[in-house]
Image (cartoon, helix red, strand yellow):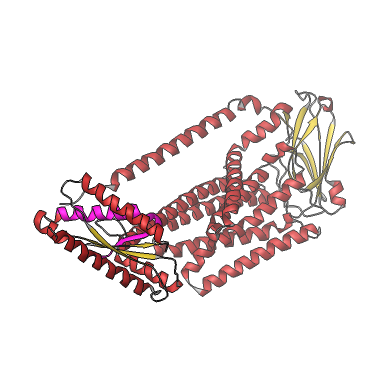
């Protein structure tokens, strides 16, 4: 008859708990999203300035252009874009905020040839990166009916191939709307940043004691970098009034450094395959990635080549890293470990998210169109990846704990007497061998022999004999275990190895031992327990542990003879 699977109810409970956690999380996120979107229709009201533009790029001129439909070949460093249009006679808003998306450009805005706003020309003169992101510009209602001219002087190559929409929002709604439109990136970026920072601090302390936490440290650092990149890339940190060039610097540094953390994480998986070619590829990728990051930082610091110009090359490296990671995990599937499969699934999800971001970014930058409407694919993929890594770490840790528990159980079984649950002969012999190897002279050995065990077995049965053995073991353990080790080395033979040679201390323990025997005989009717013992300590003539043991054993047998003779005496 097939035995019932006892682990089945536990599996069902775990599955139900996971489903409950997932459903609760989704419901909570949906409520938060609803709060963000509560006043979206009123909050998102704006005045559009997308139509009726006259635009010149180099020697080319376009008349009456709508920014929504206008695309051009991506411009190069040093090119200037001039945009001019007449503002509506009534803007319909007072003290609004003009949302301008700057993409690595120095900007000047004129109202009727009067300079109204300027950004980036001071950094342009110093050869520094201007940065990229949203700027909210105070746009008073007095500008209505006047001519606005925007000069964009390009500071980097291939920064954009279309002009972003120009809109005027109410000041109280400007930043809130930015957060709402990028709420997925906001949630995921904050989660990754906080999770990475907290976990990194904890694992950094743990690394001081053991290097086995290095992979968890890499995961936390990767999470921190991706979270920082997300908040910068989607302009969420703009609410803290951080300058555009500082935001762009953080964005590029976090993006370029993040693959290095995964490369360190992957080293164990690469070594597990034991293939020279894959190890060579790993070293090559790691060296190239490290050299590229160092070169990019140095060149940027010298203002020779800015981090933004290195982006296409770093994107190629990131794609190569992802392909290599996925290949390594597919190769590691032969190990048939569940956490390897989970990690592969996470790498595929992250690869898909990064692919979506690359398609969206390249389409927007080089072709002027964004083929994907979903924003935040990469950070969402990383959140899922982090969740999978946590599950993977949990499974790995659980497996190791089970193996450790099983190993400890086997060790305990190998060194424990089954009946009395004290140490057995094997443990005792190894303990005495350690004393012999260390030439320890501060110990004493007491040998014990339980009298009349055979008589008890023959007269009352083995169950009675077992009670006698367990009672003797209990008394010996209670008396001597706190001063050394005790063990059962035979059917009715026991031993205690004490960490002392003091005759007074040993005499006191033996007195307690006799009192314990008397108490046990009173507790259990007709037990009649009697134990012979012999004690010996090292001395100049017998300092070897084997001789000490033999001396104690001989004295025990002498004591046993004396006790038998006393029992025969009427």
> What x and y, as percent, mark residue 8?
29, 46
For the C terminus, the image quarter is: bottom left
Count of numbered circles on the image: 0
Q: Does 489 appear above or below 162?
A: below
Residue 480 visible? The answer is no
Check residue 484 for magenta coloring: yes
Residue found 73% across the figure and 57% down from its top:
309
Q: Residue lying farthest left?
A: 459
Q: Is residue 144 left or right of residue 381?
A: right
Residue 24 visible? The answer is yes
Please tell me whether the stretch drawn in magenta is mainly helix, strand or loop. Answer: helix
> What x and y, as percent, mark residue 271?
50, 68
Q: Nearer the viewer, residue 308 or 361?
A: 308
> What x and y, as percent, mark residue 80?
82, 49
**Which stretch is magenta?**
463-490
Q: Is residue 439 left or right of residue 297?
A: left
Q: Is residue 157 left or right of residue 425?
A: right
The quarter holding residue 184 reads: top right
């Amino acid at each position: 008859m097939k035995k019932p699977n006892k682990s089945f109810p536990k599996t069902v409970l775990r599955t139900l708990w996971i489903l409950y956690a997932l459903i609760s999380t989704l419901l909570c996120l949906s409520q938060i999203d609803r709060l963000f979107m509560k006043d979206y229709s009123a909050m998102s009201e704006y005045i559009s300035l997308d139509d009726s533009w006259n635009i010149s790029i180099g020697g080319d001129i376009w008349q009456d252009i709508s920014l929504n439909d206008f695309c051009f070949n991506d411009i190069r460093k040093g090119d200037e874009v001039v945009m001019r249009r007449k503002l509506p006679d009534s803007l319909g808003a007072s003290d609004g905020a003009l949302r301008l998306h700057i993409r690595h450009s120095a900007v000047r805005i004129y109202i009727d040839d009067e300079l109204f706003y300027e950004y980036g020309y001071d950094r342009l003169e110093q050869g520094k990166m201007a940065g990229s992101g949203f700027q909210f510009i105070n746009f008073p209602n007095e500008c209505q009916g006047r001519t606005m001219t925007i000069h964009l002087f390009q500071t980097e190559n291939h920064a954009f191939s279309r002009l972003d929409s120009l809109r005027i929002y109410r000041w109280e709604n400007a930043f809130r709307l930015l957060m709402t439109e990028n709420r997925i990136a906001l949630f995921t970026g904050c989660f990754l940043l906080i999770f990475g920072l907290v976990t990194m601090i904890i694992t950094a302390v743990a690394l001081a004691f053991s290097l086995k936490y290095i992979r968890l440290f890499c995961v936390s650092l990767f999470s921190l970098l991706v979270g920082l990149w997300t908040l910068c890339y989607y302009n969420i940190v703009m609410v803290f009034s951080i300058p555009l060039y500082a935001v762009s610097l953080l964005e590029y540094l976090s993006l370029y450094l993040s693959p290095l953390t995964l490369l360190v994480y992957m080293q164990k998986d690469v070594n597990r395959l034991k293939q020279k070619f894959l190890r060579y590829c790993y070293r090559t990728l790691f060296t190239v990635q490290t050299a590229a990051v160092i070169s990019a930082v140095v060149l940027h610091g010298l203002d020779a080549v800015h981090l933004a110009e290195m982006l296409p090359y770093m994107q190629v490296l990131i794609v190569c890293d992802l392909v290599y990671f996925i290949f390594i995990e597919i190769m590691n599937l032969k190990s048939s470990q569940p956490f390897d499969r989970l990690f592969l699934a996470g790498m595929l999800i992250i690869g898909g998210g990064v692919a979506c971001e690359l398609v969206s970014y390249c389409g927007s930058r080089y072709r002027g169109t964004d083929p994907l409407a979903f924003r935040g694919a990469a950070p969402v993929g990383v959140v899922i990846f982090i969740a999978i890594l946590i599950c993977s770490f949990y499974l790995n840790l659980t497996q190791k704990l089970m193996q450790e528990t099983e190993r400890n159980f086997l060790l305990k079984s190998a060194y424990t007497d089954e009946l009395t649950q004290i140490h057995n002969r094997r443990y005792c012999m190894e303990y005495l061998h350690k004393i012999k190897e260390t030439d320890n002279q501060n110990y004493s050995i007491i040998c014990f022999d339980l009298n009349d065990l055979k008589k008890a077995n023959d007269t009352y049965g083995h169950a009675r004999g077992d009670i006698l053995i367990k009672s003797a073991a209990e008394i010996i353990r209670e008396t001597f275990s706190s001063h050394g080790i005790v063990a059962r080395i035979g059917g009715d033979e026991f031993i205690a190895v004490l960490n002392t040679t003091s005759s007074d201390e040993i005499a006191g323990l033996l007195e307690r031992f006799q009192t314990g025997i008397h108490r046990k005989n009173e507790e259990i009717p007709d037990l009649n327990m009697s134990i012979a013992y012999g004690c010996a300590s090292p001395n100049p003539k017998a300092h070897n542990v084997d001789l000490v043991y033999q001396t104690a054993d001989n004295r025990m047998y002498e004591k046993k003879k004396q006790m038998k003779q006393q029992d025969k005496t009427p």
